[in-house]
Image (cartoon, helix red, strand yellow):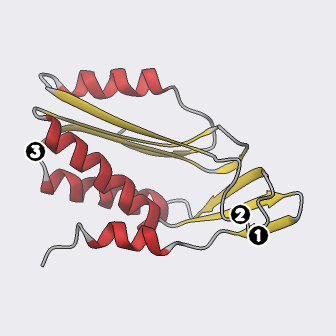
């Protein structure tokens, strides 16, 4: 399955191997792995004890599949993968994987970046961070919307 939402961690090597096997004669496989940061949008720089991601099952998977499909329509991709974790995580845990395989590196790089940009701003996840100062929901950032703007077709 090329799109998954799960609580458990994932193996980057296993995911890469599966993408490579699916892609066949790929010339490039680009992967991006996002990690939980120790410091994230805190005004007082308090370290993050945990990050909890919530989602609506079914709705989230559909949104991720739509993002993947858009990438496949824009670039000549041989294989793709999106794995996104939910639940409670601590600093430096893997949170997301995006992979794109193509005959050429430019398509693979652009598709992976496109999928990640859309995940950050359009995927229905809600993030709550816990610090020594308490808990708060993480708001979307203007930079995420700016990243999307460059992919908009005119």
Please report the residue visible at 79 percent of the width from the left and 65 percent of the height from the top. 44
- Element under disc 1: strand
In what quadrant of the picture does the N terminus appear? top left
Among all residues in the image, which is located at the extreme bottom?
Answer: 154
| Whether residue 149 is visible | yes
Asked if marks 1 and 2 touch (Cβ < 8 Å), the reply is: yes
Tell me the residue that label 3 is attached to.
76
Quadrant hosting residue 94: top right
Give the CA separation, mark 1 to mark 3: 41 Å
Tell whether 2 sits left or right of 71. right
Tell me the residue that label 1 is attached to.
136
Tell whether 93 sits left or right of 32. right
Please report the residue visible at 11 percent of the width from the left and 34 percent of the height from the top. 104
Give coordinates of residue 57: x percent, y percent. Answer: 55, 59
Q: Mark 1 or mark 2: which comes first in sequence? A: 2
Q: Nearer the viewer, mark 1 or mark 3?
A: 1
Give the CA separation, mark 3 to mark 2: 36 Å
- Element under disc 2: strand
Quadrant hosting residue 73: bottom left
Tell whether 63 sits left or right of 73. right
In the rendered structure, find residue 128 and report the number of the disc placed on it: 2
Asked if marks 3 and 2 touch (Cβ < 8 Å), the reply is: no
Please report the residue visible at 15 percent of the width from the left and 44 percent of the height from the top. 107
Rendered view: 6 above or below 57: above
Give coordinates of residue 6: x percent, y percent. Answer: 57, 44
Please report the residue visible at 18 percent of the width from the left and 51 percent of the height from the top. 72
Q: Mark 3 or mark 2: which comes first in sequence? A: 3
Give coordinates of residue 64: x percent, y percent. Answer: 39, 57
| Whether residue 62 is visible | no
């Amino acid at each position: 399955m090329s799109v998954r939402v799960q609580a458990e961690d994932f193996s980057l090597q296993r995911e890469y191997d599966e993408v490579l096997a699916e892609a066949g004669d790929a010339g490039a496989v680009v992967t991006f792995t996002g990690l939980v940061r120790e410091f994230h949008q805190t005004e007082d720089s308090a370290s993050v004890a945990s990050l909890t991601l919530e989602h609506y099952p079914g709705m989230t998977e559909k949104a991720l599949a739509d993002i993947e499909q858009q990438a496949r329509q824009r670039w000549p991709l041989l294989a793709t993968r999106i794995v996104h974790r939910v639940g409670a995580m601590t600093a430096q845990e893997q949170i997301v994987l995006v992979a794109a395989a193509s005959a050429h590196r430019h398509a693979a790089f652009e598709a992976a970046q496109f999928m990640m940009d859309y995940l950050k701003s359009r995927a229905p996840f809600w993030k709550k961070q816990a610090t020594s100062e308490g808990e708060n929901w993480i708001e979307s950032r203007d930079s995420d919307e700016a990243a999307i703007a460059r992919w908009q077709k005119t």
